Amino acid sequence: MTDATIDLARDLIRRASITPDDQGCQPLIAERIAPLGFAIQALRFEDVDNLWAVHGEQGPLFVFAGHTDVVPTGDERQWTHPPFAAEIHDGKLFGRGAADMKGSVAAFITAVERFLARHPEPSFRLGFLITSDEEGPAQHGTKRVMQWLREKGIRIDWCLVGEPSSRNRLANEYKIGRRGSITANLVIEGRQGHVAYPHLADNPVHRAAPFLADLVEIEWDQGNAHFPPSTLQIANIHAGTGANNVIPGTLEVQFNLRFNTETSVETIKATIEERLKRHGLSYRIDWHLSGEPFLTRDDGPMVNAVENAVEGIIGHRPNPSTAGGTSDGRFIAPTGAQVIELGPLNATIHQINEHVAVDDLTTLSSIYERLLEELDKAARPGG
């Protein structure tokens, strides 16, 4: 007996859609959901394909958000099963994207198919936002779609991102938010010279050492009930020509902060630049903000609907979490949408032999279907 979710997941995995090449995944999805009554738009920005689809005309707008792109496979010879063969062994579906996140996308679609078969006119609008640029620069995918939606006056009320959020067992955790991420590319300026004549040079490494020691000791905040304390990590340092008799003229330092809702971008920038000036450094600094922190509180329908759906299917309530890296939720939440992330186990994502349990995918589809039922009740008058 075949299962619709597994069959669709395998069809998607067999397409080698390494960022940003969609390889026909989105047309396959569009063909699948068109008979359900979705109004579908293919949105291509630069070299990135995106799919936007909406069913219904009234009520709050709930959107399943996901991506069809995957990271490179690495050395395919190290895979036990070919990364794009979508083979099933010992109850596990192997392939790049099985967990991150073609399995979730397949579960979205089959859940919607069953839900609309029983509720052809739900009390809310139902949408899909699918991109092929989540694993890459993330500039022309969900970010651009959200800009396009704002221009069209379309606002998402509720959103579930199918990122692999589970640890140890399916749906033991779900994300109610994510930390923000900001990277600084810092250049400390000195003067190049001969190491035998240091009085004729200015070594930026020596000058910057006290600042770097100060930088890593900054206590940004204490965190809060939902987030751990904000942290800073130096990622890369470079200076010198490679010769052992040349004092470098510049020192390049790259560092990243993962920050919570207790610390703002403005505070981060002001604090760093104040320390640079305090240490008397000549510098240039370039900031790149990947995303602000976001948090979906439990005073709206989404949290309760997700917890009820998981409990109804699996028998336990999931634990809320904000751990991990960034996701495309960072582009959706600032518009006011309630954003939750719920998907399969994350133990093998981006790894050789990425896989997901077959039973987990079918169960996940049932959870998504129950979630839609919970939201349908919440959106009805008196719900």
Image (spheres, helix red, strand yellow):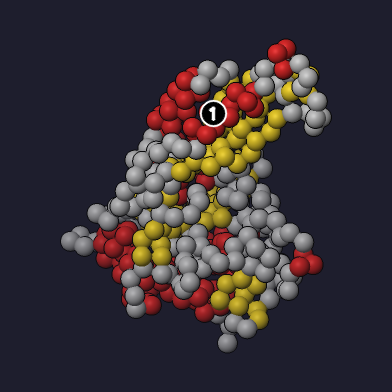
Name the residue: 56% across, 19% down.
281
**Nearer to us in this view, 372 or 36:** 372
**x, y percentage for residue 326?**
50, 49
Identify residue for label 1: 210
Whether residue 115 sits left or right of residue 201 in the image: it is left
Residue 137, quarter of picture: top right
**x, y percentage for residue 211?**
53, 28
Q: Amino acid at mark 1?
A: Pro
| Kind of element beneath mark 1 | helix
Furthest residue to the left?
382
| Residue 208 position (above or below residue 199) | below
| Residue 342 position (above or below residue 41) | below
Name the residue: 60% across, 35% down.
254
Tally of numbered tags: 1
Name the residue: 35% across, 46% down.
223
**x, y percentage for residue 85?**
72, 71
Name the residue: 38% across, 35% down.
264
**Nearer to us in this view, 73 or 228:** 228
**x, y percentage for residue 88?**
65, 79
Furthest residue to the front?
196
Residue 304, quarter of picture: bottom left
